[in-house]
């Protein structure tokens, strides 16, 4: 069983773009790449956010929006992780409906993203952590450009088989806490096989944040997606407003 | 122009304007031990409808009325100042402007040619009822329909928060809303009528506990609802 | 009964406040008492009990440039029922000029069972004017349910709306004693402080409600200190189990020279 290399040595990318320098200067009109991080309660979303903050500390201008039930402990956690100024974290209340806030009614999250840019200046990457939910929660494409779904082995090796939009459609599936696999009797090769069956060519990463506090392979994937995002943004002007469904004003 | 379907769309709690994250003061009232069951929730909704509901609906109707006027921006500016003067609690002013901003985002995406640019409020955002009035006008609703959808929203949002916060039987809570329907119609009619008058005469129904609860709520470390 | 009263204050050559006009008629009589620090203090002396439904009372107050006026009442006024279907009205119209100061600190308004009363105050404060304005409402005499009362307060500052609030209680008012409005408290009120020498105080709140761990005891009432939009004025708003507690809540503890609210 070789979970860490269950896939190719380098994480396959959704949008391979050879020849693009990931450290190319930011095109002036570019907006931050927005990456959603979803998944069940306790799977390690906040831990992954912290790992990515560490990984990108000297490399990217980073902001975080959390839909987690937000406590000072969470903020402290990210601050202690040593890499994120609290001014770069925004919390969004979700009224007990975490999936609504990231999927059906995304305004509060979009406002939080805008607020970050307004207060701390232009950003390269915004991580949006969803509140812990079930396997059916996914991010709206209106909110994020890419989404990562985090499950853990402690929930048992059946999780990928269950599918659900998070597992099947996320741009990256992270199976976290592989260090616990022997303890809970989870068979990573089963999880790998099921993930491939569910996800086709979409990539999956097996991870133990405890053992890899910089989440190297996830960071590498984001670097690649960011490079692709920048070329895409540079090539295409901002999308036009959607067509009006109604009349000009003045009706009474 | 037939507007029934449009009214239903704008009154729908699933209209993406962030309503799901607001309890209309209920989260704080529950925490204070003042709303504990179906009976106290019913009283809460009744009081909210007669105060915040009436004021919000009247200002939505007044903004709707301002749309075709020549000095629309100035009129909306007066309404903005009048609504500020009716919202003593800074937490509630912030909430109204945050909700206005969320609604504006939806409105701009759906009706890009509506005159949202005339709304006052700057970076803090425009007051929610003013945005709603413009949006309802863009949708072709009448003034009374505008007030009705606005009043309806002030009770349905809090009622649904009640289901989530207190674990109440959803059928019973729906029955509460059904029982309130007549009061909601009356409130909307009063609000629409008030919008005929000058801005300074618009309803100013006060609710001391709404102000007090809102200021307590913003100080909490952990909140499930934004208000 | 209809009655009108009028108070006009100016300054004399030496900066002391003088009353250019002070007149009233029963049951609305005005009495000047010796004031402090150059200002004047005036008491509204009610006639018999009242107002009774059907009464129409009006008081005009004009505080000219630099003048300092304090208005009190000698006792609480009790709104009482009168002719069936009739409403009693107490209208106050006040203006406060630049550099002038008005403290409006009456005793409570008590809403007796069956009353129908409107207390309607409109105050215009010029830029640079000072206003301390207290409204206190007791819903029913001891152990009694109140009649219908509306307390409406409209304040403009420098030509812009500063405060608009209209508190309604009584059997015709839906939800007034419920958890969205008064939470069963029989006493409620507010105190507005607009003072050019003092910026609005930051928000502060005491929520009251049940005391943790006790079944029956309630902390007495709830109060919030609210900086109004524009940050020029502060409003205290409170609910309380009785008039004394309410008065305590509406007696602000502020650093610096404290406006004497009694
Ligand atoms: N053993 C082990 N524990 C981990 C790993 N990653 C995270 N954890 C722990 O799992 C717990 C939950 O992690 P969080 O990052 O808070 O999970 P979350 O998904 O953000 O949780 P919610 O936001 O509550 O849904 C914490 O105690 C972490 O320390 C890992 O790789 N291995
Ligand atoms: Mg988390």
Image: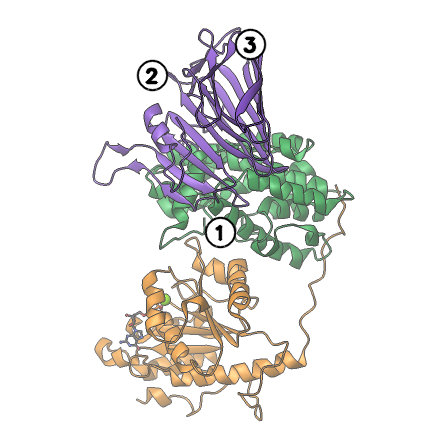
Q: Residue at x 60, y 44 (%)?
A: B129
User: How many C-alpha atoms fall within 10 Å of the one at disc 1: few (<14), some, or many (≥20)?
Assistant: many
The residue tagged with tag 1: helix, strand or loop? helix
Where is ligand 2, by quadrant? bottom left
Instruction: Please state which of residues B87 and A239 is positioned toward the viewer in this rendering.
Output: B87
Instruction: Give how far across and how far down residue C236 sits, in percent.
Output: 43, 36
Would you name the residue on which mark 1 appears?
Answer: B20
Asked whether the residues under marks 3 and 1 belong to the same chain, the reply is no
Q: Is residue B160 left or right of residue A21?
A: left
Disc 1 residue: CB within 8 Å of ligand 1:
no
Quarter assignment of residue A55: bottom left
- Subunit ID for the residue under disc 3: C
The residue tagged with tag 3: helix, strand or loop? loop
Instruction: Give how far across and how far down residue B123 sits, in percent.
Output: 59, 57
Q: Residue at x 30, y 89 (%)?
A: A1
Would you name the residue on which mark 3 appears?
Answer: C54
Chain identifier, purple in the render: C
Q: Earlier in the sequence, mark 2 or mark 3?
A: 3
Q: Is residue A35 left or right of residue B6?
A: left
Instruction: Give how far across and how far down residue C107 sits, in percent.
Output: 42, 20
Instruction: Please state which of residues C239 and A44 is positioned toward the viewer in this rendering.
Output: C239
- How many discs mark residues in the rendered view? 3
Q: Are marks 2 and 3 in contact (CB under 8 Å)?
A: no
Q: Name the image quarter holding the C terminus of chain A.
A: top right
The scheme the figure's colours follow is by chain
Check the image and report above or below for A129 versus B30. Answer: below
CA gap, disc 3 and disc 1: 47 Å
Would you name the residue on which mark 2 appears?
Answer: C142
Colour of chain B in the rendered structure image: green
Quarter assignment of residue B74: top right
């Amino acid at each position: 069983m070789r979970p860490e290399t269950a896939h190719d040595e380098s994480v396959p990318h959704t949008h391979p773009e050879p020849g693009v320098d990931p450290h190319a200067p930011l095109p002036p009109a570019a907006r931050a790449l927005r990456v959603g991080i979803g998944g069940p309660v306790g799977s390690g979303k906040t831990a992954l956010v912290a790992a990515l903050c560490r990984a990108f500390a000297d490399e990217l201008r980073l902001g975080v929006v959390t839909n987690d039930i937000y406590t000072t402990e969470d903020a402290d956690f990210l601050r202690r992780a040593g890499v994120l100024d609290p001014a770069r974290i925004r919390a969004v209340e979700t009224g007990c409906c975490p999936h609504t806030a990231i999927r059906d009614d995304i305004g509060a999250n979009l406002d939080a993203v805008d607020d970050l840019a307004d207060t701390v200046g232009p950003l390269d990457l915004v991580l949006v952590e969803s509140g812990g939910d079930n396997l059916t929660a996914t991010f709206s494409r209106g909110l994020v450009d890419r989404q990562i779904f985090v499950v853990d082995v402690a929930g048992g090796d059946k999780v990928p088989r269950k599918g659900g939009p998070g597992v099947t459609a996320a741009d990256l599936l992270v199976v976290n806490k592989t260090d616990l696999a022997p303890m809970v009797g989870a068979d990573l090769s089963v999880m790998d096989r099921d993930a491939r069956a569910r996800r086709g060519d979409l990539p999956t990463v097996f991870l133990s944040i405890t053992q890899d506090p910089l989440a190297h392979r996830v960071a590498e994937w984001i670097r690649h997606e960011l490079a692709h995002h920048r070329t895409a943004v540079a090539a295409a002007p901002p999308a036009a407003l959607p067509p009006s469904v109604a009349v000009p004003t003045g009706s009474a | 122009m037939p507007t029934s379907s449009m009214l239903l769309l704008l009154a729908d709690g699933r209209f993406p304007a962030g309503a799901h994250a607001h309890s209309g003061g209920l989260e704080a009232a529950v925490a204070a031990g003042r709303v504990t069951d179906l009976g106290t929730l019913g009283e809460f909704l009744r009081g909210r409808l007669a105060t915040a509901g009436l004021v919000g609906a009247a200002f939505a109707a007044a903004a709707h009325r301002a749309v075709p006027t020549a000095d629309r921006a100035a009129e909306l500016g007066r309404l903005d100042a009048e609504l500020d003067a009716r919202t003593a609690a800074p937490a509630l002013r912030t909430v109204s402007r945050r909700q206005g901003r969320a609604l504006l985002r939806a409105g701009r995406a759906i009706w890009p040619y509506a005159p949202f640019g005339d709304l006052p409020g700057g970076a803090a955002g425009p007051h929610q009822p003013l945005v709603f009035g413009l949006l309802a006008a863009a949708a072709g609703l009448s003034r009374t329909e505008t007030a009705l959808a606005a009043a309806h929203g002030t009770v349905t949002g809090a009622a649904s928060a009640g289901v989530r916060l207190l674990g109440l039987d959803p059928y019973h809570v729906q029955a509460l809303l059904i029982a309130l329907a007549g009061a909601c119609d009356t409130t909307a009619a009063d609000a629409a009528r008030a919008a005929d008058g000058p801005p300074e005469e618009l309803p100013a129904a006060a609710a001391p506990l709404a102000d007090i609860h809102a200021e307590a709520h913003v100080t909490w470390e952990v909140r499930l609802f934004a208000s | 009964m209809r009655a009108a009263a009028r108070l006009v204050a100016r300054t004399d050559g030496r900066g002391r406040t003088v009353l250019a006009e002070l007149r009233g008629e029963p049951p609305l009589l005005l009495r000047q008492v010796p004031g402090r620090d150059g200002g004047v203090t005036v008491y509204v002396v009610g006639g018999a009990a009242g107002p009774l439904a059907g009464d129409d009372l009006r008081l005009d107050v004009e505080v000219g440039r630099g003048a300092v006026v304090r208005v009190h009442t000698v006792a609480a006024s009790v709104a009482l029922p009168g002719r069936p279907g009739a409403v009693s009205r107490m209208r106050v119209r006040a203006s406060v000029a630049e550099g002038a100061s008005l403290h409006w600190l009456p005793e409570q308004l008590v809403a007796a069972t069956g009353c129908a009363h409107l207390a309607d105050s409109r105050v215009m404060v010029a830029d640079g004017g000072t206003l301390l304005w207290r409204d206190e409402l007791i819903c029913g005499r001891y152990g009694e349910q109140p009649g219908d009362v509306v307390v409406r307060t409209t304040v403009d500052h420098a030509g812009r709306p500063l405060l608009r609030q209209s508190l309604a209680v009584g059997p015709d008012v839906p939800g007034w004693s419920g958890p969205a409005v008064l939470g069963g408290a029989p006493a409620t009120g507010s105190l507005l402080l607009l003072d050019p020498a003092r910026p609005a105080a930051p928000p502060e709140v005491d929520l009251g409600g049940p005391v943790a761990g006790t079944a029956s005891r309630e902390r007495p009432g709830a109060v919030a200190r609210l900086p109004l939009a524009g940050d020029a004025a502060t409003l205290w708003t409170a609910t309380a189990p009785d008039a004394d507690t309410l008065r305590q809540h509406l007696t602000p503890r502020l650093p610096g020279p404290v406006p004497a609210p009694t």
